[in-house]
Image (spheres, helix red, strand yellow):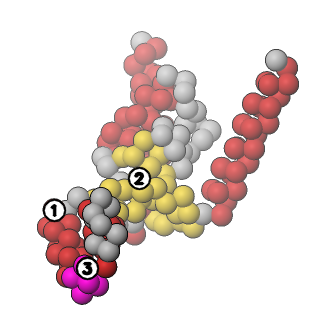
Amino acid sequence: MKDRKMILHAMTKHEEEKARKRIAEARHIAWMDYHQIGVFCETLDEIYFDLDALDDDLVSAHTECRLDLDSEVPVMWALHARPLHIDADQLVYDALDDHHEEAAAEVSQKDRDRLQVMLDKWCRDVGVESFDVDYGCIVDMPDGWIESLRADIAEFREEMST
C-alpha cells in the first residue's frame, strides 16, 4: 500500500511539473487582442463563454476553499474554433463499404471533389463549430481583473462576518 501511495504522489509531481513547463513555454495574448468568444479555465476544468459566469465560479471556488485567489491567478487558455467538416472521401468509402469490391473505383475523383464542394457549403451554412483548447496560448485577462475578483471576495467576507 505504501508503494502505491508513493507512485500516486510521484505521478502528481510529474503532472504538476508538466503543467508548469507547459505554462512557462506558452505564448501570451492580451485579452484585448484575443478574438475568440471564450476561454478555458483549467483550474475549474470548464470552458467559459461568459466572463461573468467565470468570475462567479472563481469567487465561489475561493469561498468554498477549493482555490486560493489571494495567492494564485488561474491560467486562462485560448480556444480555437473548429468548424464542422465532413470528408467526402471518407463518406463515400463508408457508404460503399458493403458494396462490391470495385464500387469505390466507380466513383471518380471528379465526383468526389464535387461532393466535397457541396459538403463544405452545407457545413458552412449549418454553422456548427466546436472549440478546442490551445495549450500553447495563455489569454492574459484584462488589467484589474484579478483585483476585482479579490475585492468581491473581500466584500463577501465582510458580509459574512457581520
Side of 21 relative to 37 (left or right): right
Residue at the image point whose x is 42% and y is 25% from the top: 156
Give the amino acid type for the residue marked by disc 1 in the picture.
Answer: Val
In the rendered image, is residue 86 in sight? Answer: no
Residue 11 drawn at (x, y percent): 74, 38
Q: CA distance from mark 2 to mark 3?
A: 47 Å
Badge 1 density bin: few <14, some 14–19, many ≥20, Cα 10 Å: few
Residue at the image point whose x is 47% and y is 46% from the top: 41
Q: In what element is the residue under mark 2? A: strand
Q: CA distance from mark 2 to mark 1?
A: 24 Å
The residue pinned by badge 2 equals 39
Residue 56 drawn at (x, y percent): 37, 35
Residue 112 in the magenta stretch? The answer is: yes
Give the amino acid type for the residue marked by disc 2 in the picture.
Answer: Val
Side of 20 relative to 100 (left or right): right
Magenta part mainly helix, strand or loop? helix
Quarter of the figure with residue 38: bottom left
Closer to the N terminus: mark 2 or mark 1? 2
Closer to the N terminus: mark 3 or mark 1? 3
Instruction: For the N terminus, give its image quadrant.
Output: top right
Residue 42 drawn at (x, y percent): 52, 44
In the rendered image, is residue 28 in sight? Answer: yes
Side of 46 relative to 73 (left or right): left
The residue pinned by badge 3 equals 106
Image mark for residue 126: 1
Q: Closer to the camera: disc 2 or disc 1?
A: 1
